[in-house]
Amino acid sequence: MNLAVIGAGYVGLVTATVFAKFGNKVWLVDIDEKKIKDLKKGKIPFYEPGLERLIKKNTAKLFFTTNYKEAIPQTEIIFICVGTPNRNGEVELKYFFSAARSIAKNLKKPAIVVIKSTVPPGINKQIEKIMKKYTKVKFDLASCPEFLREGKALEDTLNPYRVIIGIKRKSVADKLLKLHQKISGKRLVCDTASAQLIKYASNAYLPTKISFANSISVLCDKFGADVNKVMEGMGMDGRIGPDFLSAGLGYGGSCFPKDVAALIRLAKKADYNFEILKAIQKANQVQIDYFLKKIVRLCGGSIRNKKIVVLGLAFKPETSDMREARSIYVIKGLKRRGAKVCACDPVAISEAKKILSGVRFFADPYQALKGAEALLLVTEWKDYRQLDFKKIKRLMKSPVVVDGRNIYNRKRLEKLGFIYEGIGR
Ligand code: UDX
């Protein structure tokens, strides 16, 4: 099939590459000239395991352009994958509407326009109206929200838990089901508003699990329980499930914080006060203060002028993405308390430099830890799971380890002479 994908971000680039892999001819359109120029040279704009290789393997079927005219006229299915960022709690739709207008202006034959961007449920009528101003050609609007995780984007797109197909006409569903044939996972065909709400509801429910685990972690500290065991035990109940119950510093990234905020706002506009989600947001914030208080206590009541090393800057491992990374809030809190902050990350340092000032960055954690008075584990990169703590003990001035992701073995560290605390264990 001839396809077009609008937007060369995570979702768009991965979607285009996967459909090209399955033998379709795919045009990827983005208005960012530099991005398209780089992509033509095989350079991808972010770090995502396996993606660069898969793009290179499929260059014969993948075409990059900034020009809608080149891409749209010959395509049967067009995916809109542009960002819908948060602007003061509102969903920013200007890129989305602009993409819809540009598609409409260039339609030459009937096509299905599939919305993958996260948009407010029920918005299709408005989009249809806008597009009809610019074209007389028939088109169908469908909604197939994307659920990929950064760092696992290819795996999640090739083997998702489910493919949601929101449509108005059955024939459109049949065509989209056919297009997704080689992708595994369950299928759900529904109306477009439900498809759009499935996305928001999922991206609000997973943070609910995380914030719940984090709140229990505080109780674990108070009652002398181990949150990892508590969550393992809870997760054994099939109705609860073991996923997204890792307690620690809370959730960040480009989706959860944005989508929780957007759903609260959308609910408010619909005259519903979504109290549960407000509490989830709050719990995510206070977890940072809880962590900072622990650090100050373990450092003898003050961290003023003390060298503190933060391990991990990206919002999670296997990505260079710093959006809403917990490290930002931790580091700001440390600096407010007068600490001298050093930070390490295997790939996110250049991104972090754009956001954080007054921090010394190190690629090598051992280099950073010389003379340090506390080691804080903030992002659980594989490199930081396998550190040589015997060596670290010799390097640090004061052997305090505060584990924001509960990955280290307390007994082992205490045996080596460290003062260790996780969160809730
Ligand atoms: C998420 C959703 O998983 C994905 O389905 C959606 O489409 C986009 O948002 P992503 O933001 O890439 O994906 O990351 P994810 O792996 O879900 O982690 C999000 C945040 O939650 C990270 O900061 C992570 O550290 C945190 N997290 C995750 C926890 O704190 N505990 C957990 O148990 C799981």
Image (cartoon, grey):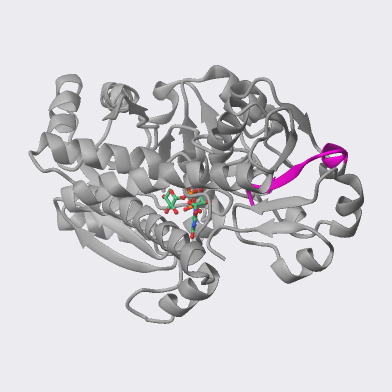
Pinpoint residue 332: horizontal percent, then vertical percent: 57, 29
Q: Quadrant of residue 410?
A: bottom right
Q: Is 418 situated above or below 398?
A: below
Is 388 magenta? The answer is no
Pinpoint residue 291: horizontal percent, then vertical percent: 55, 47
Residue bounds of the magenta highlight: 367-380
Q: Is 348 situated above or below 230?
A: above
Give 106 or 164, whichever is nearer the viewer.
164
Asked if residue 370 lies left or right of residue 339, the reply is right
The residue drawn where x is 47% and y is 61% is 217
Q: Is 159 situated above or below 4?
A: below
Give 285 or 38, whichever is nearer the viewer.
285
Asked if residue 360 lies left or right of residue 234, the reply is right
Asked if residue 37 lies left or right of residue 28, the reply is right
Judged from this view, the residue extending furthest toward the front is 301
Q: Quadrant of the C terminus?
A: bottom right
The residue drawn where x is 38% and y is 49% is 146
Q: Quadrant of residue 39?
A: top right
The residue drawn where x is 37% and y is 30% is 85
- Residue 233 visible (yes or no): yes
The residue drawn where x is 47% and y is 74% is 230
- Residue 48 visible (yes or no): no
For the image, the number of numbered tags is 0
Pinpoint residue 339: horizontal percent, then vertical percent: 68, 30
Pinpoint residue 170: horizontal percent, then vertical percent: 16, 58
